[in-house]
Amino acid sequence: MSSALLNSKDIKAQASRLGFVGCGLSRAEPVAEPFASHYRRWLELGYCADMDYMRRNIEMRLQPDLLVPGVRTIVSLAMNFMPKNRQPAISLYAQGQDYHDVMKQRMRQLMEDTQLEGRCFVDTAPVLERYWAWKSGIGIITSNGGFISVPGYGPTVFLGELFLTAEADHYDTPLAPPPLEGAGERLFCPALTPEGLDTRRCISYLTIEHRGSLPDGIRLGSTFYGCDRCLRATPQFAEAKPTTEPAFQPSEALLQMTPDDWQSLTEEQYRALFKGSAVKRAKYDGLKRNIERWLEQ
Ligand code: SF4
């Protein structure tokens, strides 16, 4: 580990040049209350559905140095994903290239440019990313849906974290206290409960992560991959503006897809249409299952 302090201004300036719309630094301390107990309670309630990886490594999720020994600083980063145009059947975040790849490549570039030592994570490790984004002051937690909303960009952001072994010359503070538990949830969706998101009832989870048939009675709304209703319902969604990042724009072929095209989608077309896209997570069979339910409505 280098003994030199990280220069937070340099890191933020370079992050901005690389297209991140939020960058903040936190000390890598254990996750504070009430976040830690809220997370444990959420698991106890079974709200993580069959995402078993959420139940694994609980302590690691709550104590960063169990994930990366020697970590001193966590840098939270946000990229705006709001596309200029969109294919209406697909959730906003999945219109372009897979954010895991885009974010990681950009975060590695940031580490290289500013000579940082550590690891980078994008949604694939036991990290409470919204907590760290809140703690490092890059956005507020919305009372509706618990999104991170970045001032000037709203809640349409991807999050990532650098876990660094050096101390920084300055640490950020939250922009606002977290909302009181459940205080602002608008219970227009049965998956939104005062104790957090009940993933088992969430269309986004069901159409992306869930394997097997969709539960009876689930109505998909306008999208068959993901669901943007609670995102759009946050007052901060009004701040969302199109990203300048070309990787998050949909292809012409995706924009031109019609309900008839979706109905007849072959596996070959699916592969071509979603090459390098996060939509592949649902697999061809999962997508066909979703399309069938969506067209029945
Ligand atoms: S993504 Fe859709 S189904 Fe899930 S909580 Fe939000 S509004 Fe409800």
Image (cartoon, grey):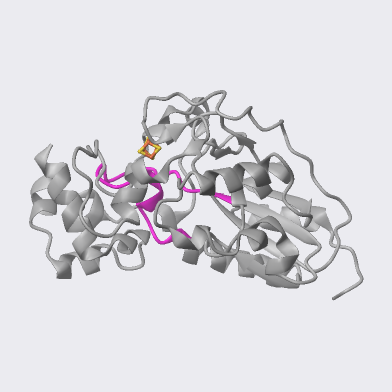
User: Outermost residue toward the front?
Assistant: 44
- Membership of 88 in magenta stretch: yes
The relative height of residue 296 versus residue 7 in the rendered view (above or below) is above
Image quarter (top left, top right, bottom left or bottom right) of the C terminus: top left
Depth order, front residue of 186/57 = 57
Task: From the image, give the main secondary structure of the stretch colored magenta.
Answer: loop
The relative height of residue 240 versus residue 225 in the rendered view (above or below) is above
Q: Residue at x 31, y 64 (%)?
A: 280
Q: Position of residue 292 (x, y in %)?
A: 13, 49
Q: Residue at x 49, y 63 (%)?
A: 53
User: Outermost residue toward the right?
Assistant: 3
In screen coordinates, is 161 left or right of 122? Answer: right
| Region in magenta | 78-99
Image quarter (top left, top right, bottom left or bottom right) of the N terminus: bottom right
Q: Position of residue 98 (x, y in %)?
A: 41, 61
Depth order, front residue of 103/113 = 103
